[in-house]
Amino acid sequence: MVGAISILVFARTLGAEFLLWDDDVHVTANARLDPPTLRSVLGFWTGPFLGLYVPASYTLFALEAWVTSGPDPRVFHAVSLALHAGNAALVVILLARLGARPAGAALGGLFFALHPLQAESVSWISEQRGLLAAFFGLGALILYARPTRSLRGDVGCTILLVLALLSKPSAVVVPALALLFEIAILRRGVRFAAPRLAIGFIAAAAMFVITKSIQADEIVKGIVDVPGRILVAADAVEFYARKLFVPIGLAPDHGRRPVLVVAQGVDWTLVATTLVAVAAMLVPRVRRVVILPFLIFVAALAPVLGLVPFAHQDISTVADRYAYLALLGPALFVARAWPERPGLALRAGAAIATLVLGALSFAQAGYWRDTEAVFERVLVVNRRSWIAHTNRGLARQMRGDLAAAATEYEAALAAKPDHARALNNLGVLLVQRGQVTEGEALVLRAIDADPRYPRPHMNLAAILGNQGRLEEAQVSARRAVELAPFDPTMWATLGNVLLRQQRADEALAAFARTVELRPRDIEGWVGLGQADVALGRHARAIPSFERALALARERSPGRVRAIQAELDRVLGR
């Protein structure tokens, strides 16, 4: 029942689109999913991708793309919806295993499923990784909390924990949650719990080390000193606690960067709230009911409180999606506080609270229907969000409204002058409008702002190549390939530069790598054909042009005539 209600509340996400924020790099523009193959899926398991090692999540993305012979947002949203409903059901089972009465466990599960803080995780396809990690993590906690020990259960618990860690590193909190359950509720003794908890903490530590080794220090921005981090962490806990009780003003960018939090100094409201909370904890009856849910809430948030810097802090330390598994703590409070024989007033209050949470989540999910809608919402919550302006600009640029797109990029740069993505996008837009010199200058500024961002290097190569500055263009193209070796677009750009330099053999290798990475890459096949023609191998060029022509008819009708003309020239027509 809990799962069905959560599906009812969030069903509107089934009609939502892919976003231009992360959904493109993870799914729609991910060469390994175009199309997904056994080899491309194995690639997720043999090394990191996009700065993370989460092969289980990318395997699920590949399966979803394979089902419909290409990414279909309805399929991805349906899987996210099913995962959230499954997680809600698992929470009910876990709460019951932790001693809650059936009605209390169901009510706790409803709280977990319907709280508006969950809307971001359910509605955003890219965050399906968090849903999958929670699914495996909750399964591991249920097996851990079973009343009797068995080898099969221990193995199953370990496998589920590993799968959770391979879905998203946030699952490192699962062993800590198991330890809290053991100490406060299960109490089965050190000999019973220690071996299994040790395995869990070792696996979590290994994933922490792997993640930190993959993510270069350059992408971890917004770092402050240790006293500042403590203030940032306290501010984050207060933020999540406030949104827990008053779940309004939610959006994917709250703009709470560490430097801003520290610059504001001590928040005396936060101090007063903390003192009140500590005083309440001194009351034995309150302490017995509240302290464990509170510790679970904080423990689940610990990796993203800012004590250890992480990449998203350049935008905001806090994010709605980070609270997904943390809501297990409040759900436990609801479940354990529900009496055996609740009065009419309490039942009515619970029903009203459930309806309110459901209505707020329904409304929140509606903001995620497309890129423009979600970032319009962001600007209501955070008027200086450069992320919102940049993504709105990209959406408008893609539909051909260059003037509106430029206005958005300029607004993004007014808020953050060194935002590399806005600089790059505005530079490309200016080049499209014929302002080549100004556009090149902005792309160069984007490279200065973030030297590891590959797109500006690729775009600079194209700009320089169009000006005949081919040696400089080759340097930029090779840097783009170095930064993004698994992006076929980078290889195609390098191939085009090499072809114009009359280095056809090297161009052929670059285009071969392009179609190896993305077998349905139209420009890669065209480039292969052009390189073979330049080498005088006309017979070998024909299949490449024919493949490009077939793909263009299917995916890009506007390219058909030009490709057909090249094929006709090769055939001597």
Image: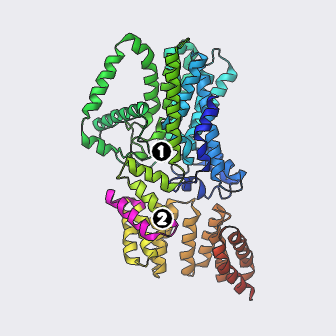
The Cα atoms of the two marked residues, 2 and 1, are separated by 37 Å
Residue at image point 54% right, 24% down: 108
Quarter containing the N terminus: top right
Identify whether 399 is placed above or below 136.
below
Residue on which the image places disc 2 = 396
Q: Position of residue 459 (x, y in %)?
A: 47, 69
Q: Position of residue 197 (x, y in %)?
A: 55, 23
Can residue 452 be seen in the rendering of this structure?
A: no
Q: Nearer the viewer, residue 334 or 328?
A: 334
Q: Residue furthest bottom?
A: 573
Which amino acid does the dot numbered 2 rest on? Arg
Can residue 215 be seen in the rendering of this structure?
A: yes
| Camera-side mark, 2 or 1 | 2
| Relative horizontal placement of residue 443, taking residue 34 as reference (left or right) | left
Is disc 1 surrounded by few (<14), some (14 to 19) or many (20+) residues within 10 Å?
few
Which amino acid does the dot numbered 1 rest on? Ser
Which range is magenta?
Answer: 398-421
Considering only order in the chain, which callout, 1 or 2, is on the residue closer to the N terminus?
1
Residue at image point 68% right, 83% down: 565
Is residue 523 highlighted in magenta?
no
Q: Position of residue 19 (x, y in %)?
A: 54, 54
Residue on which the image places disc 1 = 213
At mark 1, the secondary structure is helix
